[in-house]
Structures are given as C-alpha cells and as structure tokens.
Amino acid sequence: MRTLRAVSLLALLLTTCWVDQANTIRWLALRKASLQWNGTGAVATMCRKARVHFGLVRRQTKLCRTASQAMPHIARAAAQTVATCQNVFADRRWNCTSIEAAPNFTPDITTGTREQAYVYALSSAAVTYTIARACSSGALFHCSCASPPRDPPNGNFKWGGCGDNVRWGSQFGKQFTDCAEKRGARTQPRRKARFVTATEPGRRRRGRRRRKGGEGREEDDSKPAPPNFHNNRAGRRAVGSSLVTQCKCHGVSGSCNIKTCWRALPTLAEIGERLKRKFAVATEVISRRVGAGRKLLPASSAMGLYNEDDLIYMTKSPDYCIRDARIGSLGTRGRLCNTTSQGYDSCEDMCCGRGYRTIRVEKVQRCKCKYHWCCYVQCETCRAWVDTHECN
C-alpha cells in the first residue's frame, strides 16, 4: 500500500506544471510563515495562505495540498537556505542579506547574476536535502530509507542501516523548484489561444501548435532553458555528490566484528561551501542560435564549456560597494572588516578603498569556568575592551 501511494504521488508530481509567477524562489518567504502545517487547520486554507502571502506559485500550491506532509520540511528548507547562504558569505561584500526580502527580491536576485545562480542552486539543494533526510527519519509517509548501493562493499562491512533518500528528495525537489522554469510554463492567467490556419481569410498562417506535457501549452524551441533551471539541477547534483559512507559497529564490547554501513548526507553548510566553490568559477553565458533553436553558450570562447555541475549566469554582478536600490546593492557602509586579513573580509576589500573607523567596545563573556562534582559548571563574568573596525 505504501509503495502504491508513493508511485501515485510521483505520478502526480510529473503531471501538468502550470504556474502563476516566474520567480520560483519566492517560496523562501515560508521561513517567516507561522502556519501550523501539522495542526488541525484545513490544508487547503493553509496552502492558500502560503500562496497569497508567502510566494508559492500555482503548481507549488497544488503540491502543498497533495503532499502537505512535506510542507514543514519545505519551510525548514527555506530557513536553512537563508541561514546557510548568510553564513557562507559572511566575509563577502554580498553577504546574502538580499534574500531576506522574500518574496519581494532585490534586482540582484532577479536579473540573472552570479548571486542569483548561487541562491537558486542552494535553495534547490536545501529542498532535496530536507526531504531526503525526512524520508530516512520516517517523517514522510510516501518514502522511506534509500535502497542500499548496488556497488559491492569495498571493505570489511556490509550495506545496511537507513541511508538518506536523495533520489526521492531530488525527484520531489525537481518538481517543487523547477516548475516555473520549464519552457512553455504559463506565467500569466490562462487565456484562450487562437491558432490561425491558412483557410481563414484575411489572416496570415502563424505555424503549427505544439503540445508537450499538458493540454493548451505551447513549446517554443527557439527559447533556451533558462539558467535558473540549470542552476537548480546543479544544486540537486551537489547534494547527490556529497553523500558519504557512515558505519556502525556490532559486536561484544564494541569489538566491531560486524560493521554495517550506509550512505548519508553531511550538513547543509558543507554543501553550501561546495556550491560556493562553484560560484567562484561560474560561467557567464549568452543565448546563441544553434541550428533551428537556441542554446546557452559561454560568453567567451576562453571560458570553455560548462557541465551539469557548474553554475551559470547571464548578467555581471554589481560591486556592492555603494548602496543602490536600482541594482539591489546594499553597500558596505557600516560593515565590520578585519585589519589583519588579506582576504575578502579585509578592510581594504570590504570598504572598497573608502577607509574605516575603529570603535572600542566592551565585550562581556563567561570565563574561568570550573566543573563541580556533581554535576554543574560555574563560571565568572569577564569584561574586556576590544577594537572593532567599521567601513566608512
């Protein structure tokens, strides 16, 4: 019965993909939602609120109603995306604060920049990650532990345990995050499409209608798949390639006569760092006509071709030095910097050559802690004056 339910849910996920908004990361606003997904409220009502106030598009709202058990994990993925992004880029001029404005993003997250590529990849990875972990923990009814790897054990152990179900998480994440990025997906209210034929007098023949994936949808092969679609997939692939082998010993007094191993995910912060390395070498692309259609190709032949694991972008990023709402730059005035660093957090780089000011502040912290038997720790309160440096 459980397998049948899982198959039926996957079939539902792979059906029509109508949406209302083009920006599919508006759902990051769910981190601010106080909806009680596991409460007694009606699921339809909560999903409708999530659409109106927290950025879900139509297809995501439908998934919300049909797979409501996953929604607490989607909200958790939104919160983890913001926290991870800000931690990973804490020492950069762009410190990911712009995504706090969800569902109303600043232009630097909506114009095809390198930063947008990272946010899309990380948010897609976060959905895959949280759903995969929820499956292995038994929190979702429609999925369970991952199947054991097909490769034979390379060592003195056997496959077992409960691995994180990245396959299911990736399938669900693909449907939740990719819907509005698919070519031909409706981003405006549905209107009756009229296709004129040569038999109608006084009108020019417009060409054939092509349907793919749903009734009434046009598939235009002249339009390239947007970079967001590629970056979403790169995020999911980063999760899959981050799986590590974890083991548990069995035997008398931990002798490890028998060792059982499974494939598990590291922390999302480690995946965020992996994507940060991809961010540093992201490829700028442009749309070029190739044959009868168009493709996203590197803007410069010196860049070389990109693969499915790389991030791509179409618009150069602002320098984020000066506050400019037109481009989404918050500026670095007032940001803390490090006078002894030679990296991105150095005062020279962070302050963009404008200089900095030193402020002496009192820091209060616990110190001289002692353990008393049994069983508490007693500490003193220490005060110290430290110098902090803020950009002008």
Image (tube, helix red, strand yellow):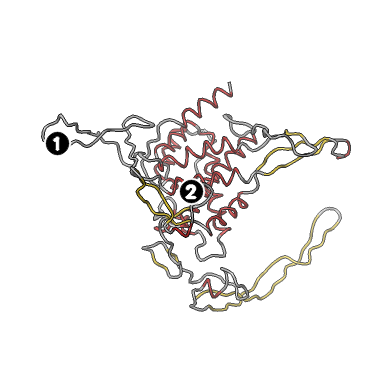
Q: Describe residue 132's horizontal placement relative to residue 40 as left or right.
A: right
Residue 203 numbered tag? 1
Residue beneath label 2, please?
Answer: 231
In front: 123, or 246?
Answer: 246
In front: 7, or 26?
Answer: 7
Residue 213: x percent and y percent?
A: 39, 31
Residue 75: x percent and y percent?
A: 52, 44
Q: Residue at x 40, y 47 (%)?
A: 226
Q: Is residue 95 above or below residue 178?
A: below
Q: Residue at x 55, y 58 (%)?
A: 86
Looking at the rendered image, the disc whose residue lies closer to the viewer, 1 or 2, is 1
Q: Is residue 340 above or below residue 293?
A: below
Q: Describe residue 243's horizontal placement relative to residue 58 as left or right.
A: right
Q: Earlier in the sequence, mark 1 or mark 2?
A: 1
Check disc 1 and report its element: helix, strand or loop.
Answer: loop
Per the model, the C-alpha gap separating discs 1 and 2 is: 41 Å
Q: Residue at x 37, y 51 (%)?
A: 287
